[in-house]
Image: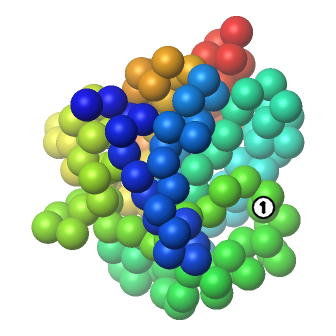
Amino acid sequence: MNIYDIFVKSRDGKEVALKDYEGKVLLIVNTATGCGFTPQYTGLQKLYDTYKDKGFEILDFPCNQFANQAPGSDDDIHTFCTGRFGITFPQFAKIDVNGKNEDPLYTYLKSKKGGLFSSRIKWNFTKFLVGKDGTVIKRFGPTETPESIEAFVKNALA
């Protein structure tokens, strides 16, 4: 199995094949609208604007598993993110990243790049960088800002 065998759900509930992103560098992020890290949306959008025409995509997966920081519907979350941060990168349906209802995408990502002491996602805005060939290159913790990982994105695109 590889990342391109996985399907995810769009905000409107349609199945999306990650194969649609084959050949692109991906930054996959679990997000929340009411988190102290929510302002990272500004940096994510800047990264996206800088590199989207070079084969870069950010895939945003809202998650409400951490202190109920992503309340509301998928449309509510999208309206907040586009209105407040002007995001234009793909935003998917809300998912779980840990536990019995964990999305298969996150099961896969964590199996490839576990955390320091556990593969469990610890908080919102954990980021996974995936290369053009589908290899999970690196996992970044929530405190690692989009600005601090730009060099990794540039390198993956090279």
The image shows residue 52 at horizontal and vertical percentages of 79, 36
Looking at this rendering, what residue extends furthest in the top direction?
158
Q: Quadrant of the C terminus?
A: top right
Quadrant of the image occupied by residue 117: top left
Q: Describe residue 45's horizontal placement relative to residue 15 as left or right.
A: right
* SS class, disc 1: loop
Please determine whether, in this image, residue 121 is positioned above or below residue 110: below
Q: Nearer the viewer, residue 124 or 36?
A: 124
Tag 1: amino acid = Ile
The residue shown at (70%, 32%) is: 56
The residue shown at (53%, 90%) is: 72
Residue 146 in sight from this viewpoint:
no
The image shows residue 120 at horizontal and vertical percentages of 22, 50
Q: Classify mark 1: residues with Cα within 10 Å, few (<14), some (14-19) or many (20+).
A: many
Q: Quadrant of the N terminus?
A: top left
The image shows residue 40 at horizontal and vertical percentages of 67, 55
The image shows residue 94 at horizontal and vertical percentages of 46, 72
To which residue does mark 1 refer?
Answer: 87
Quadrant of the image occupied by residue 10: bottom right
The residue shown at (47%, 79%) is: 69
Q: Describe residue 18's horizontal placement relative to residue 118 as left or right.
A: right
